[in-house]
Image (cartoon, rainbow, N blue to C red):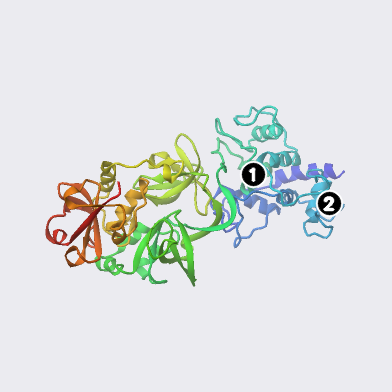
Amino acid sequence: MRKILLQIGVICLLLAAVTNTGYAQIFSDVKNDSKLNEELTVLNNLGGVVQSPNESFRADDPITRYEVAEFIVRTMQIDLEMSTIPTYLDIPADDPRMPVIAAITELGMMTGFEGEFNPDAKLSRAQAVKILVPAFQLTGQAAIPYTDIAKNHSAEPAIQALVANKIVYPAKNQKFNPSDMMTRADFVSYLARIIEPSLRPAEPEQPVFQSCVKETAKKRYVVDVAVTNLWNKPNQGRAVDYPSTKNPVEMQKWISSLSLSQKKWLVGRTDTQALYGDEVSLLETKGKWQRIAAKDQYVPYLKAGYPGWVPKSHVVATNKNYEDCGIAIITADKTNLLEKDAKTKFLQISYATILPVIEETAKYYYVETPGDGVKLLKKSAAKSYESYSEVPKPTATTIINEAKRYLGLPYLWAGTSSWGYDCSGILYAVFRTHGIMIPRDSFYQATGGKAVAKKNLKPGDLVFFAYNGGKGKVYHVGLYIGDGKMLHAPHYASKVKIESMNSGVYKKNYSGARRYL
């Protein structure tokens, strides 16, 4: 009798679920204009999820057996007081999870194994759909375009039903990845589409990939804005600097609004920048600011990297590890990361940004972002490699031509992004893009590589200038391009340009050269 009532209940749910034209944010980490938020809203209206706008949904986390049971039971609005309490060796009768487990057990949708329910066990994609499809009595047959699902696969009937009912609409030659862990986002998406037909995709969807990303116990800190300024003191920004301190940052708006005197003010107050996805170390916290160290920017006095203060909102903590992933290095001046629909812009990022690649198609890389899951990156805007060490060594011509792309770009003190560079920042960015991590600042760049006599200079060498007629502290660097000329970013009132290094103050203060190629 209960199963008959359940069937009627499912039908009623399908008829009763109504989608809205606008959606409030259900969880803090799910954007209110996203497809997932729309799906969560439908489930929230039915009680399948509880709206928690100040909490995270953890969309990319693997789903557990208990979470599957809870989503199903609460979405079906099962009376939790009616079920007989089962006996499981690992779940006491008074466990707060028992009502849900009792309901899903009595309905026959999920049972234990060897006397245990294993509520915290994670489910593969195949295991999850084999529970979900029968739970809602989904039927139907359709050709399965997934290239990794054979006819004798245990999940094949369930996947057929998903395809036949347009719960999934796989693209040609797409993989289902049955052995990968089912994410919380994917499961609730399938569940919401079963309940509300209007949510079902009308065209092939881009695939979901999880392959190389590993969850670890170790927490890492990553830059979560296109570019962040590292200040030498916390909370030092002026009102005019607000576009560069909020999240998301508006770098072009900020730089364009600065007068020359306001640009000059930055000298000695900002020290460097870090790009989207750069790993940093967390050194100290004061209010809404954090002192971090940029891992890939060498300084001799701090092993963790180049230190500076940034707004707390510019850094995100993650337990994800990408050591097994390839990388994409942005080679375009700037490019937009896109949402999975390949149309909606997510974030504009800078040249030299490096992001982990988890999969690719003919036109796009699927890249992991610091805190917003997988986004699309046009292949025309980047190059990918198995690892940073696999980036081929560039020629001097390559380095020079890359730097020439920024001729005319206004100087920005401490700049390492394509919104604005300082003298050492442009060289750091160009070399970084081509697999060579040189030191960040000119006076440290002058200590690396191989020393070169002036008479032996070759295009691609770095040339340095120091106070006290070239004998004091190095204060400037340029890229030698031949014929006594260098490409450089002179000062806050200038732009990236080419000029002679053998005249005026540059001839007087020449201090040496280094070769990194």
On residue 181, the disc is: 1
Q: Residue 332's x, y, as percent?
A: 35, 45
First along the sequence among labels 1 and 2:
2
Q: Residue 144's x, y, as percent?
A: 63, 29
Tell me the quarter of the picture where residue 47 sits: bottom right
Viewer-side residue, 507 vs 56 = 507
Other-residue count near label 2 (Cα within 10 Å), few / some / many at <14 / 14–19 / ≥20: some
Viewer-side residue, 213 vs 15 = 213
- Label 1 to label 2: alpha-carbon separation: 25 Å
Q: Residue 412's x, y, as percent?
A: 29, 60
**Residue 316 visible in the displayed image:** yes
| Image quadrant occupied by the N terminus | top right
Horizontal relation, residue 444 to residue 184: left or right? left
Horizontal relation, residue 167 to residue 460: left or right? right
Residue at image position (80%, 59%) is: 95
Q: Residue 464's x, y, as percent?
A: 23, 57
Residue at image position (29%, 61%) is: 443
On residue 378, the disc is: none
The answer to whether the residue labelled 1 contacts the one labelled 2, judged by CB atoms less than 8 Å apart, is no
> How many discs appear?
2
Horizontal relation, residue 452 to residue 125: left or right? left
- Disc 1 marks a residue whose amino acid type is Met
* Rendered position, 510 above or below 388: below
Helix, strand or loop at label 1? It is loop
- The residue wearing badge 2 is 88
- Disc 2 marks a residue whose amino acid type is Tyr
